[in-house]
Amino acid sequence: MPLKNISLKNFRCFDNLKITLSPRINFFCGANGSGKTSILEAIFIFSSGKSFKSSNLASLIQHNNESFLLEGFDGNKGYVVEIKKNKKKPISILLNNSKTVTNKLIKEFPCTPIHNNTFSFADASPDFRRKLLDRSIFIAEEEFSKTWFSYHRALKQRNAMLKSNRISDIYIWNDKISEDGEKLSKFRKSFFDKTLFEFKKILKITESSKVFDFFDFISIDFFRGWPTSESLSDNLKKNEHLDIKRRLTTNGPHKSDIRFSINETDARQILSRGEQKFFSILWSCAQHEVLKKHYAIEASLIIDDIRSELDERVFELFINLLKHIENQVIFSCIEDCFSSKMLCDFKEFKKFHMEQLR
């Protein structure tokens, strides 16, 4: 559910900040270093218990303080979440005054983050693209996390057998890897197909091909990690000698990817940084729309520094897209790029000038 009220205490540059968010559009604008990204970062922590900026949560504690405290209130269910991080203690998460874990957060406060790392989605590693896809499936499918962890536990054991040259023991794990791997791939392929469907709808709504003609020629394909002509079980048997030689499992869902090409050429070789950023935004928005349209999940969409590297024409496409997103959207930009005329096209649009929040 979308957050209504948030409080940041001793977090980054904020001593004590309280904000009431709109259920629809929230726009934070201000100079670099003013704290707008920190607010988006805090909202992401409400959803995951993690930061998209730093792997060390203790580094987010304001200077000369021992801990930070984040508090959030969801106006729909009446949920209250409290996240505290002390320099010398693990993260503490309370949901309605009861201790909980990060996996619970992603279900109760789901969000789709779009930030500096995701802007180069097409140019990123297959592992990064898998993580973004899996994050949405974790939110959407109850059984996915169980299958995901079961598969990776079995994969870890099989790889350990290969590395220690205990070849006779790898067969113990083949059946488990095959069973869970096939299930995992079906989850991913199903969500990918839904995302591709929503992506094509977004292209039509925004008329993006009028600005970027490459959208008329782009191909987006899901590679499951082994040939479609074979079962995973048969592929493991066929690659047994290769796996022994390399001392790891060469094929499987841990090698899956989403591949982008333009006229049969890798899209990374063709797209500029601005084109990649806009493409990444559209693809992430499509994943976000799947949660709403196919699973009835009210997730928040977070976009950091939207205007960077997008010219006026492309930004207008984003504005057009924004009109069609029904869930809560929270995004930031250095300049105030929304005129009074633009705001008339939106309901429940809330603008935050960072200098007024400090």
Image: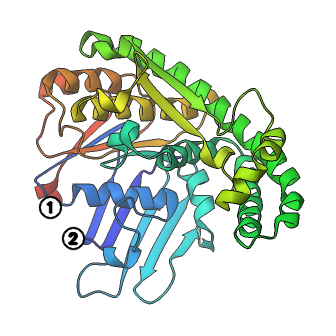
Secondary structure category for the residue under label 2: loop
Contact? badges 2 and 1 (CB < 8 Å): yes
Q: In x, y percent, where is residue 222?
A: 58, 30
Residue 277 visible, this orientation: yes
Crowd around label 2: few <14 · some 14–19 · many ≥20 (10 Å):
some
Q: Residue at x 17, y 20 (%)?
A: 313
Picture coordinates of residue 60, whole percent (x, y): 32, 73
For residue 136, the mark is none
The amino acid type found where label 1 is placed reads Gly
* Quarter occupied by residue 27: top left
Type of residue at label 2? Cys
Question: Residue beneath label 2, please?
Answer: 13
Decide which of tag 2 and tag 1 comes sooner along the chain.
2
Give the residue number, with chain letter if any, for mark 1: 33
On screen, residue 275 above or below 235: above
Is 138 placed left or right of 304 in the picture? right
Q: Position of residue 229 (x, y in %)?
A: 75, 26
